[in-house]
Amino acid sequence: MKRSGLLVGLLAAALPVWVSSAARDQHSEAADKPMRIMSMNMCTDQLLLSLLPPERIASVTWLSRDRGSSLMADAAMKVGVNYGLAEDVIRQKPDLVIAGSFTTPATRGMLKRIGYPMIEVGYANNFDDIRAQTRQIAKAVGEPERGEALIADMDRKLAILAQDRAPALRVASWDRSGFSASAGTLQDEILRVAGARNVVNEPPASIYGKPDAEILLLTAPDLLVQGSPYAAEPSLGDMVEQHRVIRQYWKKGRMLTVPQAYYVCGTPQIADAALSLRDQMRRSAVAVRAPLPFAER
Amino acid sequence: MTRWLIPALLLVLALVSTASLLAGTIWLGPDEIVAGLSDPAPNLTAMLVSEIRLPRLILAILIGAILGLSGAVLQGLLRNPLAEPGLLGVSGGAALGAVIAIYFGFSATFILASPIFALIGGFITAGAALMLSRGGGTLSLILAGSAVSSIAFSLVVLALNLAPNPYAAYEIMTWLMGSLADRSWDHVQLGAPFILIGGFLLLFTGRSLDGLALGEAQAESLGINVGRTRMLALFGTALGVGGATAVSGAIGFVGLVAPHVIRPLVGHRPGGTLVPAAIAGAVLVVTADIATRIIRIGPPINLGVFISVVGTPFFLWLVLHVRKQTA
Amino acid sequence: MSALTLETVTLRRGPRRVLDDVSVTFAAGRLTAVIGPNGAGKSTMLTVAAGLLSPDSGTVRLGEDLLTALPKQQLAVRRAYLPQRAQVEWPISVERVVALGLLPQLPAFGGLPDAFRPAIDVALDACDLQELRDRKATTLSGGELARAMLARAIVGDPELLIVDEPTADLDPRHGIDAARRLRARADAGRTVIVAIHDLDLALRFADDIVAIRDGKLLAAGSVADVMTEPMLAELFDVRARIIRDADGAAIRFLE
């Protein structure tokens, strides 16, 4: 009786403080929500463009306008552009700068020194990172509910995938520099949640420090995943990416595409890529019932 | 003495070539290779050998041979043991041509664009270096070659920075340092015709180079057309080294080392160095390629880097040696 | 064997006439010495005579044939030319140097046919080089190198032999030896043309003299006719005396 009375009394004493600070927070939130935000990193660009309408974004980097590596290229066209330079900050006068850990160190250092409102966001390597960064940016721009909504959508799709995976086919990701999607990359995460077995993480490929075309033949994956979008802009890497053995054995019917824009930066849209990959794998499963002619068992 | 030189060199080439087929990320035994190749059904060993190792070996032989041959011809033409396609900037010019062809779309429309652009680039740089060094001695030759080479390579970097493909800048190292990684029969088809024609032209200069040992005036008096010899050397080098660079990037020093090693074995007769230097060059590149594949300390080493690591001390020694001789 | 004839040959370099309307005949079976002060045009005349430089006007004939009409290979077989201070650029053996003289007669590929070996031996003997045949040419002394070069010039037995300053940098003994060998060629019926500074040797060994000054022919004819004190004084712009005694003739220049 006495204890419960004490508790109620304490709560009653704390209530006005708690309510008034909450009221003050709400009031300050409405006043302090940044209205002109500048993002100086392609990955933070993506999240920002997903969270806010164009009117509240001062600029994003020029890289986000490139359809090949940016999912939000259309949205990026509607806002201003910056090149990661301190001069851009001076000219565009944002009330909040979002920088990535890879934004020009000189610019970041200078903004920090003069105390400009800035947050630094790290690089996402897995789904937890994606959630944390989405929340971080959403909070900084004053739209935490939007952030949660994006995360919830991603988690919903991941849950669907967890129930309903693709057949566990052996897959390798091969691009201009050979094998990619090693463990610890977003690309590997996409393959994993879609249900694929990424051969680069299993022996024999995992034994070799730099697996090459010989290892590709040795592991003989059922399917190959490629994601490079620069077909119209040729480079030396094309000769590796379109190696003769790939054209001969994987190009017809064993080739899957995950546009690299989905994994160059970690955004909640990554789940869409995993779903698409799962569907592609299902469609190919019938065709790849037989192993490759030179596969060793 | 010279009678057994070429057969001996061919034997060494055969040995390292065999090693090249056995060595690699996955070591193969000779019996496995024979079994695999004789099996009509596709199997891993046959694939490895026929699709990956064999084209790589053939490229290494062709590239090494043309570099060695071109070095021998240029040294005979200029009467200078320091002349070679790398030093004269031919490789740089060829790399520039190939980079422009590949990264600015010409190769997509016309498959032979890269070796042709490479040959034009090599021709321009070789011509420029030869013109700049006319009349001067060794020093002016090295300076001219250095200048032309630097200009060519900085233009390569510029071109790659301007290229539409954003990965172009990352591929600079391959171009500047040479590589045979992941090459296929596509590359052999592209480069071989140019290398073979260039080599053919170069082989015709043998007699003239012998005569040039007496200087240009006496050579002319012996019926040698020095101007035509110079053109054959220039075209042969541009074609051959152009084709080689288009498929592997710029590789230097082979044309310097191979003829130098061979020369005393043929009595210093310049015409006699041609074929043996070609074979020696092939041995060098095949061996270096094997080394890059089996050395597993740290990240993979580019072929050109490896050859430079071996070649640069040799070059320095050679410069001092030549200075001592002429002093 | 044929005579070499220059007819009204003129060669300009820029505004200067290096050879000015020169007409002269070099007879077969005779040794002709071309003399003159520095810059007179001796080397240029020899180069034109060898067919290695085309005059701006005038003709050069070997026997009846215009030099310009002869195919390069054929001319190379018939005529041998040695420039001043001939060098060898690679350390090849003396034997190889001599063999190079046979280049015009060799096929494009392949080694030296055995049929040619006797000719090389003859040339080595004639120039006293048998002991040096395996030595590297870059290690030879001045006299030895001169002999090797001459051997390379005569190995193909050309009918026309043109040598620019064969005795430059040679000591008296080697100078006389060189002159004697050239003399022997002329005696064998060849046309020998030599540009030379050593006038005493010219006096002793030449049959004919061609004197040239500032690109113009000053005198041409037999030694006896041309080598006079007035001619020498005009040619070299210095007073000259020809001293004759029991051992022969010598020229003394006075201030």
Image (spheres, coloured by chain):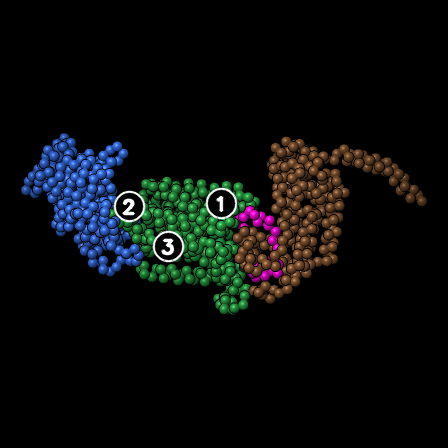
Question: Dot 1: few (<14), some (14–19), or many (≥20) neighbours within 10 Å?
Answer: many
Q: Which residue is mark 3?
A: B200
Amino acid at circle 3: Phe
Q: Position of residue B143 (x, y in %)?
A: 39, 41
Give B170 or B307, whichever is nearer the viewer: B170
Which numbered tag is attached to residue A221?
Answer: none
Q: CA distance from mark 1 to mark 3?
A: 27 Å
Relative to B310, C210 lies left or right: left
Question: Earlier along the polypeptide chain: callout 3 or callout 2?
Answer: 3
Magenta-colored stretch includes residue A145: no
Secondary element under disc 1, as helix, strand or loop, is helix
Question: Do marks 2 and 1 share a subunit?
Answer: yes
Question: Do marks 3 and 2 share a subunit?
Answer: yes
Residue at left offset 25%, top offset 52%:
C104
Q: Which residues are magenta?
A: A215-237
Question: Earlier along the polypeptide chain: callout 1 or callout 3?
Answer: 1
Q: Position of residue B258 (x, y in %)?
A: 39, 53
Amino acid at circle 1: Ile
Q: Which residue is mark 2?
A: B216
Question: Earlier along the polypeptide chain: callout 2 or callout 1?
Answer: 1
Chain assigned blue:
C
| Most common secondary structure along the magenta stretch | loop
Secondary element under disc 2, as helix, strand or loop, is helix
Which numbered tag is attached to residue B100?
Answer: 1
Q: Identify the hue of chain A.
A: brown
Quarter residue A296 falls in: bottom right
Relative to B33, A291 lies left or right: right
Give C200 or A71, whichever is nearer the viewer: A71
User: Could one spot residue B295 in this view of the protein?
Assistant: no
Q: Identify the hue of chain B.
A: green
Magenta-colored stretch includes residue A235: yes
